[in-house]
Amino acid sequence: MSIDKFVTIESTAVPLPIENVDTDQIIPARFLKATTRDGFGENLFRDWRYDKQNNPVADFVLNKNVYSGSILVAGKNFGSGSSREHAAWAIYDYGFKVVVSSFFADIFKGNALNNGLLPVQISDGFLNTLIKAIENDPATKIKVDLQNQEISMLGTNEKESFDINPYKKECLINGYDDIDFLLSQKEKIEEFEKNRA
Amino acid sequence: MAGKTLFDKIWDAHVVHEIKGGPSVLYIDKHLVHEVTSPQAFAGIDKRGIEVFRPQNTVATPDHNVPTMDQHLPIKDQLSRFQVDKLTENCKKHGITLYGLNHPSQGIVHVIGPQLGITQPGMTMVCGDSHTSTHGAFGSVAFGIGTSEVEMVLATQCILQPKPKKMRINVEGELSKGVTAKDIVLYIISKITASGGTGYFIEFAGSAFRSLSMEGRMTVCNMSIECGARGGLIAPDETTFEYIKGREFAPQRADFDKAVEIWKQLKTDQDAVFDKELNYNAADIEPMITYGTNPGMGTKISGNIPREDEIEASNLTTFKKSMEYMGFEAGDQLVGKAVDFVFVGSCTNGRIEDLREVAAFVQGKKKADNITAWIVPGSKQVEQQANKEGITQVLEEAGFKLRQPGCSACLAMNDDKIPEGKLSVSTSNRNFEGRQGPGARTMLASPLTAAAVAVTGKIVDPRTLL
């Protein structure tokens, strides 16, 4: 099986300048009762996005028509808390392909990479620059070039490089799946088991 | 060559293969499974048309989603029932041991692992739940994984994982009266913040941890993830061996003695080097409580919420948002705030020792009228033990009622939701917005503090009542 191949993205972005966005905010626990991976986007940021009567909260960024695009630009320590992969599914299902932040929680980062959602970690300074630019002009376009590990603001000289594990980079670019890789390691795994017995 | 840390020793012994410039193929000894993060993984296995590779190394139980009343009846909530049934079906199909809802060993996955003797020193353990770090209390490398990784383990008994950095947190000295394991870990998180451990695996060392019971050590390791660390571990010692001895899945008789000889080697070499090392003094730790919306926002209960000028500029927006949600003012005194709910339970503090602590405090006292208290044992065995020791009766006489085992109001997936706007003092692990129900406000504390709050009806320093 495979995940979607990650291609270079040029898109407008949605700013979410809140720190410590935990996975309970991304997808509250009461929406984890599904047994498939589909449809979680509907409840992405549910309790920030809708009020108690299920009416959209006007000043939440996903409800502001001026912002759109496949890049979410969020505050420091994004994805902390629960290991629920549903958080990555919800973000991807909503239509984001990239999350940009100055710091990611470990489990979220791994979950994102396993689902073709690219976490791009940049400096606090550049994050600030991006958020200000997007808020000033929601038409601001951002380019995320995974091959060259570079994120830039189109039409400006603003850019920064980002790190990614070379193995994961290959997987994303080619749409490879970790499980296919692990299944190809079966002989080594069996040998490991034999040697320690 | 420098020596190895305990973490290195266990990790390195489980590396099947290292991908150049990439993650390691890490062999997993024990895999714990629950109903919420596994159905998509089993579906993946089925879709690939493959079998579970080592079904005997996986153990399953429903916990997150189960009701805590009338567990003998079919689950009312249709989606919950479907998810729990799906777990049963998947386990049956793939030959995986399941402790179902009415099995005497059912309970929160991180409570039953140690209790059954499944958790042992030197193991690698994973579960699709971030509090898998709990099992590190036994000197094992245990951490939470996502559902894609659950599928990896089902398919190959391995996951792909980059090796984290290593941190050691030393706490030396004796704890003061009224200060418990929960206070130590809330203290550490308040010092290093909710992201201070990200990228690391922590070893907790020093006399303060050595003097803790296994239950206390589990509470500490459980909350490693709340400072962002993937896991935390404590070197096994006599306390550990004594706890494991005689449990259902522990090595028996001569095998046990042999195992102990091996487990005794599991410690950090004197000349091992950590990427980061922190030192604290147990005598500086007081009963703790959180006031904000992440576990790093905690302070001593006798203190005040920080003033805005005490908050770093970069954190001020988050702090203000947090205060608005909690309905608190910066600089507020904590003691005396009126509380509505008390929750005792979860994989952090739902073990027998926690219930004993609460019962010992409330014996001969009455619950305050303004308090609704939910006491949820971590497992059927904890429930049984509480009945046997008369804890259930003591609690009932004080006006509490024991519910049935499950994750309950820790994450409020079932009906155990704190109503909107209500203030809860909880022995669980997360005070995120809405964690205990939409609009619920959570303050994290120890079981002892929770018991003191239940009796007085407001935030109180438990030491003033001992």
Image: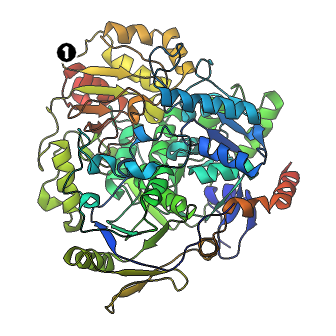
Residue A1 found in image quarter? bottom right
- A121 lies left or right of B252: left
**On screen, A147 above or below A89?**
below
Q: Residue at x 33, y 14 (%)?
A: B400
Residue matched to label 1: B369
Q: Nearer the viewer, residue B17 or B234?
A: B17
- B298 lies left or right of B410: left
Residue A80 found in image quarter? bottom left
| Quadrant of image for the C terminus of chain B | top left
Classify 10 Å Cα crowding around label 1: few (below 14), some (14-19), many (20 and above).
few
**On screen, A68 above or below B78?**
below
The amino acid type of the residue labelled 1 equals: Asp
Q: Secondary structure at mark 1?
A: loop
Q: Residue at x 60, y 41 (%)?
A: B39
The residue at the far front in this view is: A65
Q: Residue at x 81, y 34 (%)?
A: B255
**On screen, A85 above or below B77?**
below
Chain letter belonging to callout 1 = B
Q: Nearer the viewer, residue B13 or A89?
A: A89
Image coordinates for residue B297, horizontal then vertical, percent: 28, 50
Image coordinates for residue A66, horizontal then vertical, percent: 24, 68
Q: Nearer the viewer, residue A179 or A50?
A: A50
- B355 lies left or right of B146: left
Q: Residue at x 36, y 77 (%)?
A: A123
